[in-house]
Amino acid sequence: MKLKLPSQTITFPRRALLMGIVNINDDSFCGDGSLDPGTSLQQARTHYQNGADIIDIGAESARTNREAISIDEEISRLRSFIEQWHTIRDLKPKDKEQLSPPLLSVNTWRPEVVEQILGPEVDLLNDMSALPDNRNALLCAKHQTPLLIMHSVGQPKMPHTHQQWRGLMKSMTDFFEEKTAIAIEAGLSREQIILDPGLDFAKQKEDNLLLLRELNQLIHLGFPLLLPISRKTVIGEALDIEDPTKRDAGTLALLAHGVHKGAHLFRVHNTEACWRALKALSAL
């Protein structure tokens, strides 16, 4: 299995890739976001120095109890970071398996933003929209930027806490078959697509636990799979921990489980702890 980027091709199996989270906002659910470009860049440097292969930047919180920011504001926040991204690319990797230079992923979903942000500095579009149409796929194909497709229902920034599933895994595989076909028809190759099962998005506790147990059904689709495991609500529910920043032990448990099931990428806050866990799992 391969992931084709504009600058390189990554071949799996290999040590799983870590995606370090940088929130260019002031309402992140973990309280780690900042509107100061210097702070966001330092967070990215720290992630890379702690073992991240990819830096995932987002300017708008996914929290459904917060109003969406304007398109112009989102573009401005993202550009403030991207314009300084070159200052991070010369850092030395933590070990020989870490990607060097790091990749830049942009977490956004509105086509008006995607159109303004994609370019040579961006290695991946992390799209949480569930691909309702082909616009973002067409833009990715235009720039030859890989596309991450996340499973969900309905519009982002809207609560879907009452979504009920009958046959979640069948629905999810049908969803990904439909959406990957849209992306391929738009001009992307299979090697330019990543899948994300969307933990906590339009899913309840038992739904999340089910998809984690049955990940092999998604691995068999033949695309790299990203697990956004970090400090998720399902961890808080399982451990009875309300504070997201106290959920790192549960995050590491899901990391080990995901590696065992065959996931290829993990989106995390505590990069250093996750890098050490991957290092230990690789040794085993």
Image (tube, helix red, strand yellow):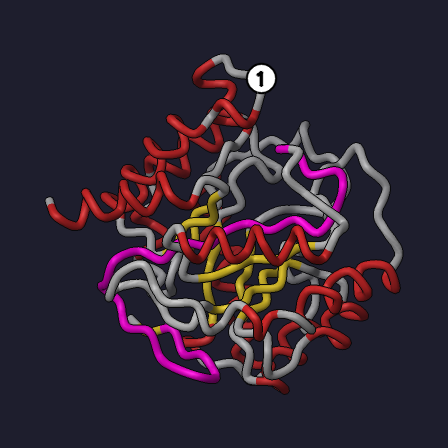
Taking depth in this image into account, of 211 and 104 the one nearest to the observer is: 104
Q: Residue at x 42, y 45 (%)?
A: 271
Answer above or below: position of 232 versus 134.
above
Taking depth in this image into account, of 250 and 220 the one nearest to the observer is: 250
Residue 155 appears in the figure:
no
Q: Secondary structure at mark 1?
A: loop
Query: How many marks can you see?
Result: 1
Q: Residue at x 28, y 71 (%)?
A: 1
Residue 141, quarter of the rendered image: bottom right
Q: In the displayed structure, does residue 157 sit left or right of residue 199?
A: right
The x, y position of residue 70, in whole percent, is 89, 56
**Mark 1 Cα shell of 10 Å, populated few (<14), some (14-19), many (≥20):** few
Answer above or below: position of 13 versus 65.
below
Q: Which residue is mark 1?
A: 242
- Is residue 37 one of those drawn in magenta? no
Taking depth in this image into account, of 131 and 128 the one nearest to the observer is: 128
Q: Which residues are magenta?
A: 3-30
The x, y position of residue 125, in whole percent, is 59, 67
Residue 185 appears in the figure:
yes
Quarter occupied by the C terminus: top left
Answer above or below: position of 191 versus 271.
below
Q: In the displayed structure, does residue 112 sit left or right of residue 170?
A: right
Residue 18, quarter of the rendered image: bottom left
Q: Residue at x 32, y 63 (%)?
A: 98
Amino acid type indicated by mark 1: Glu
Residue 245, quarter of the rendered image: top right
The x, y position of residue 153, in whole percent, is 65, 46
The x, y position of residue 242, in whole percent, is 58, 17
Q: Residue furthest left?
A: 284
Q: In the displayed structure, does residue 119 sit left or right of residue 175?
A: right
Q: In the displayed structure, does residue 34 sit left or right of residue 15?
A: right
Q: Residue at x 65, y 49 (%)?
A: 23
